[in-house]
Amino acid sequence: MHALHENLHAKFHEDRRSPEDVRELFSALGFEDVPEDILKRLSLLSDIEDNKTKKNSHFQDAVEISEIIDNLVEEESLTETELNELRYAALVHDVGKSGPAEATSEEQGAYVELYNLNFDHNEYEFDDKTFSPQEVSIEKALAIKVQEGRLTQEQADRTLELVLQSSKKQKVKRFDTKLSKKTPMGTFWSAHVYWTYDILKESSVKEEITDVAASHHIIDGHDPAQIGIDNVTSTIASLEMADKYQAFRVRLILADKYQAFRKRGAKSHEDTIAIMKGMIEEKLFGHDKALAVYMQVLGSIDKHKEIFEKELDLDKVEAQAG
């Protein structure tokens, strides 16, 4: 772990942070002018206090991913400025989980509520049909949580009302970011990268940082910056010899995947590496340059198993699961 994160590690491995706390982290990275809207959204995404339905803090996820990336680039010749830009992109990559750029504070809270729904089963039955969590509609997802006693009917109705109200105000429609109550949760989950792009762009965040942050699901086909999966260099020996932002993007994509499989998917390191290897080979079949870059970074992740398990507080996660 780099010294900067080591100094702030204890404070930022907490369940709740105010906008001022978030500002302090960015300030330590040398960014004094982070827009207030972004600070407030990240604070909202960190707030899991006193809510049994919120098992994950999305901003905590971002802090952990920035720490994973620190270890992925520690052998590279990066300046502190370059490293801090990569950390910045990691910290804001999920800011779109607070909803579209046009969402009010109250509407942002509803989006966070919806993104924090956790599903305990792989299948759900409605009207004699079986649905995966990805296929369940927004309306049905909220109904499941009411049935489980994790939300009241009033809370579910208000969340749905605010999300649909906010969705109608979007200025830009890319992908399926205009929602209805019948929108599948998988579609809803994927929309956040497009909202991340819009939020950062409207906040005048550096274009390259915005593109890196919003491209973390590019391997899944979601490319709001329209960069293209093949936009990587064939020279992978050193970040000095590559477009650093291309290299940054691959590291953020795979750090995000690794953390998701380990924490939310409860997979072992070995299973995660095997799953990611298969996914990369399938998704990048025929994209030889990109495949080489992704596999190199995956090898770096495999090498840092012990460090990443510490960074992700996996002992704590396993204790809670037990």
Image (cartoon, rainbow, N blue to C red):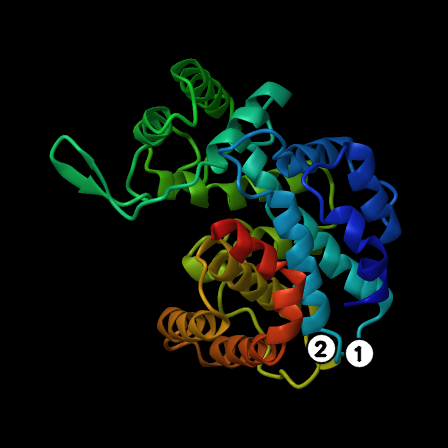
**Dot 1, how many residues are within 10 Å of its Cα: few (below 14), some (14-19), or many (20+)?**
few
Q: Is residue 269 above or below residue 221?
A: below
Would residue 130 be found to the left or right of residue 65 on screen? left
Q: Position of residue 195 (x, y in %)?
A: 55, 39
Q: Is residue 321 above or below residue 114?
A: below
Question: Looking at the image, which is closer to me, 128 or 180?
Answer: 128
Measured Cα–Cα span from mark 1 to mark 2: 7 Å
Q: Is residue 25 visible?
A: yes
Would residue 30 be found to the left or right of residue 104 on screen? right
Which element carries disc 1, helix, strand or loop? loop
Q: Position of residue 119 (x, y in %)?
A: 38, 42
Rendering quarter of residue 74: bottom right
In what quadrant of the picture does the N terminus appear?
bottom right
The type of residue carrying mark 2 is: Leu
Q: Are marks 1 and 2 in contact (CB under 8 Å)?
A: yes
The residue at 55%/38% (across/down) is 97
Q: Can you tell which mark lies on residue 283?
A: none
Q: Position of residue 260 (x, y in %)?
A: 50, 57
Q: Earlier in the sequence, mark 1 or mark 2?
A: 1
Q: Position of residue 251 (x, y in %)?
A: 61, 67
The residue at 43%/27% (across/down) is 150
The type of residue carrying mark 1 is: Ser
Which element carries disc 2, helix, strand or loop? helix
Where does label 2 land, which residue? 239
**Dot 2, how many residues are within 10 Å of its Cα: few (below 14), some (14-19), or many (20+)?**
some
Question: Looking at the image, which is closer to me, 197 or 26?
Answer: 26
Where does label 1 land, which residue? 77
The residue at 87%/47% (across/down) is 27
Q: Is residue 55 above or below residue 257?
A: above
Would residue 180 be found to the left or right of residue 296 on screen? left
